[in-house]
Amino acid sequence: MAKPNKPTAQRVKINLPGGFVSVGDFRTLLEAAQAAGVQHVKIGARQQLLFAAEPAQIEEIEYQLFNQELPYEQNKDQHPNIVSSYVADGLFNQAHWLREGIYKDILASFTFTPRLKINIVDAKQSFVPYYTGHVNFVSSSIGNYWHLYIRWPKTNQVCNWSSLVYSMDIAAISQELENCMLHNSYTSSAQAAALLAELESTIKASGNFHLQQGAEALTEADFRLPYYEGFNPYADKYWLGIYRPDECYTVSFLLDVCKVCQTSRVGQLYTTPWRSIIIKDIHPEDRPAWDRILDRHRINLRHASNELNWQIEDWCEPALKLKRSIVQYFDRWNIRTYRLCFGIKIGPNTGIWGSIIIKQRSEERPDAPLFDIFHTQDFKANSRQLVPYKQGITAKALPSTLKTLCDCFYDATLQNSPPAPETPSADSPEFSAGNPHQALYRCPHCLSIYDPTYGDTFADVAPGIAFDDLPTSYSCGLCGAPKAAFIALDPHNPTPLTP
């Protein structure tokens, strides 16, 4: 007798517009999930909250969320979350006019729930992607005015408006664009451009919007994904980044986070497109309370930097498994991935972005899939122009193929970079390349390596300075670990040397 099929878990999505939520609201949301028996939640690629529930739990969840007036979607994504770079404000950018109040005013002006993906990002940061939405607002050099880039659903074609959009017109113009794009099928890029040009002319003629002409062209920030984990000082406080390799956060841990926030004057939590959580405004005197929470829940911080720069689809276990195998290879061979980010696309039209894209072939057998590898034009993370690199690669061959592509990127970067510094004189510290037996040093927290050949750009250490000659006050330019924590390595064998 055949066994009855196990009921399929239901997927619940709760949007957090702009990628932030008040601690009180977040706690209420988590308590509702916990009351229904949910033990784990995830952060989605569009900064939303995700969790799975058994069919027997759904009725209780619906009751809890309805009582708390919390909008949610079950097994669907009709209303994508509004993404913003508010999470990067003050941490990963130096915006000259875009501030917390402007983000909040814009989000508060949305009187409708969008059905298209909307991005609202600062041009001076590279933490949140520019063009992964259908309607993408990117800050301009003129205060309170935004560039507008439009990508028709299920296409890779991006058009831009000729005029800048005023902050408080973003919501209304988004609604006009949504009405146009959802009621007109895409047939060609020329037809889409004509429809959008006609709409822009209508909006200008109405006199109801504040548009700005003649602005400078957008200058995109170079992609340099900041290290977004652990405790990091800024101003006279700390911010804390928390990342989980399995993308899961226990509800009990997050509830404890909320309790510490409420007792230590932290008002908001932030979610990121990298599926991490950031807490700002942690006072130095409250640091021990945060350490206790991390200890209690065994939360590890400071993962390898090449583990943090991946974009994969929501609810996609095959992509997560593939990412883990590639990261394990990268760690084993100490492969540099700085200024690169990777995306894995298993399904079609998923909006996954990155400077290197791994795409599974849909026609292959699921038990032996093949993959095509692409990179963006000039390896720019925000570019939508994909360049084919290798086709028909097995999962086993992916890591070594990606290593070769990473080498191609750095070779091309060196060819276009300024001339290398002159060879140091005999009185200067020796380069490791000239002395193959000189030990390199690895930071045990972020796994970056101090190589005298390159120095440490982030800590303002010039090339050619041996590790032993660094001052005792030196700290890792990537994560801030002290010099004393570094571990000696043999340059030809990445295994740490014994003391």
Image (cartoon, helix red, strand yellow):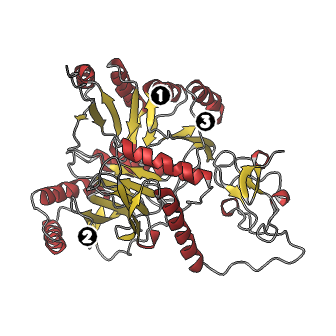
Please name the residue that numbered disc 3 is placed on. 283
Question: What type is the residue that disc 3 sits on?
Answer: His
Mark 2 or 3: in front is 2
Label drawn at residue 329: none
Q: Is residue 227 visible?
A: no
Tell me the CA gap for discs 1 and 2. 41 Å
User: Is residue 225 shown left or right of residue 452?
Assistant: left
Give the residue at x 33% y 22%.
Answer: 32
**Residue 80 image point, x, y percent:** 26, 46
Please name the residue that numbered disc 1 is placed on. 258
Closer to the camera in the image, 224 or 232: 224
Please name the residue that numbered disc 2 is placed on. 159
**Residue 69 image point, x, y percent:** 25, 28
**Residue at the farthest front position:** 1
Looking at the rendered structure, the secondary structure element under dot 1 is helix
> Mark 2 or mark 3: which comes first in sequence?
2
> Mark 1 or mark 2: which comes first in sequence?
2
- Find out whether the residues at labels 2 and 3 contact each other: C-beta distance under 8 Å: no
Give the residue at x 63% y 80%.
Answer: 418
Tell me the CA gap for discs 2 and 3. 44 Å
Q: Using the rendered view, name the quadrant where residue 15 is placed.
A: top left
User: Is residue 265 shown left or right of residue 206?
Assistant: right
Question: What type is the residue that disc 1 sits on?
Answer: Cys
Rendered position, 284 above or below 92: above
Is the residue marked by circle 2 packed among few (<14), some (14-19), or many (20+) residues within 10 Å? some
Give the residue at x 39% y 54%.
Answer: 344
Tell me the CA gap for discs 3 and 1. 15 Å
**Residue 298 image point, x, y percent:** 58, 28
Q: Using the rendered view, name the quadrant where residue 151 is placed.
A: bottom left
**Residue at the farthest right position:** 427
- Find out whether the residues at labels 3 and 1 contact each other: C-beta distance under 8 Å: no
